[in-house]
Structure formats: C-alpha cells, structure tokens
Image (cartoon, rainbow, N blue to C red):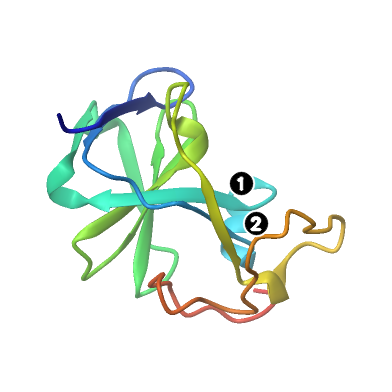
Amino acid sequence: MTKESNGSCLCGAVRFRTRGALRGVVYCHCSQCRKQTGLYYAATDVDVSNIVIEGEGNVTWYAASDFAKRGFCRTCGSALFWKRNDADKISILAGAFDLPSGLTAESHIFVADRGDFYAIADGLPQHALGSPSVAVAQTRRNE
C-alpha cells in the first residue's frame, strides 16, 4: 500500500495530495526563507509526478531567483511550495500537511544566515550553506 498524505493552505483554496515516501524535514534558514515566512522554511519534498494540486489556479509562483520559484496561495498568502527550475521534485512546507503528518526532522541548512533572535538546539545536523543531499538556490548572506 502506497502512503498518501494530504494538506492545504490556511483558507483551503489550495489542497494537495502526495503519494509515496516524503523526504525528512529540512529547515532552511536562508534570508529568502526568513523574509518570506518570518522565521525559516520547514519542508519535505516529493517527486513532481507524485503530487496532485487542487486549486492550482490559486497558486501564485514567485521567482525569487533565476534558480527556483516559491508557490503560495494567492488568497490567504500561505507559503506552500519551493521548486528548483530544473528539478523533478517539489518541496512542500511541512506545516501545510494535515495531521498526523508522519514527518520527521532531518537537518538544518543555511544556518550561517539564521536570524540572530533564536538558537538551534535540537541536535540535528547543521550546514552553514546547503547540504549535498538538498539542491538549493544560490543566495547571498543577508539579502
């Protein structure tokens, strides 16, 4: 039996269903994620072929770099997706999944850019920039 997970934005205008295994949650502390969410991204990912998005017309895509785009609900503003332009995977914000999500934390990336108002003390691996297992956009410190 293939695992299915469901989720949505805050207002429900965008719903999604994933099929198959999800990557562990990676916390991204880069300046773009901080500025979009107010803290950091906590995201998993799945093959593009294993996600169905209902209300896709309500997703606005913002190209924050020439490398990737960020998808959010145009009605309520919920940050939902991150997708590298040439990737076969799409990142989905962990908080958008319905509970129980079954997700587990994996690591932190771009900790060199983390906000100066919090500490990371969960014992997970920390990477100053990206990590070899997670393809990320190229960002500058303190954008």
Q: Residues within 10 Å of mark 1 (few under 14, many from 20)?
A: few
- The image shows residue 65 at horizontal and vertical percentages of 42, 71
Q: Which residue lies furthest to the right in this view?
A: 117
- Distance, label 1 to label 2, CA atoms, is 5 Å
Residue carrying label 1:
37
- The image shows residue 74 at horizontal and vertical percentages of 40, 33
Instruction: Identify the element where label 1 is drawn.
Output: helix
Residue in the image at 60% along x and 81% along y: 140
Q: What residue type is labelled 2?
A: Arg
Q: Which amino acid does label 1 sit on?
A: Thr
- The image shows residue 70 at horizontal and vertical percentages of 40, 53
Residue 56, compared with residue 127, is above or below; it is above
Q: Residues within 10 Å of mark 2 (few under 14, many from 20)?
A: some
Q: Which residue lies furthest to the top in this view?
A: 12
Horizontal placement of 88 versus 128: left or right?
A: left
Residue 13, compared with residue 52, is above or below; it is above
- The image shows residue 98 at horizontal and vertical percentages of 43, 22
Horizontal placement of 33 versus 60: left or right?
A: right
Mark 1–mark 2 CB contact (< 8 Å): yes
Q: What's the mark number on residue 78?
A: none
Q: Residue furthest front?
A: 1
Horizontal placement of 29 versus 68: left or right?
A: right
Location of residue 135 by image quarter? bottom left
Residue in the image at 47% along x and 49% along y: 43
- Residue sitting nearer the eye, 49 or 122: 122
Residue in the image at 52% along x and 76% along y: 130
Residue carrying label 2:
34
Q: In which quarter of the image is the C terminus?
A: bottom right
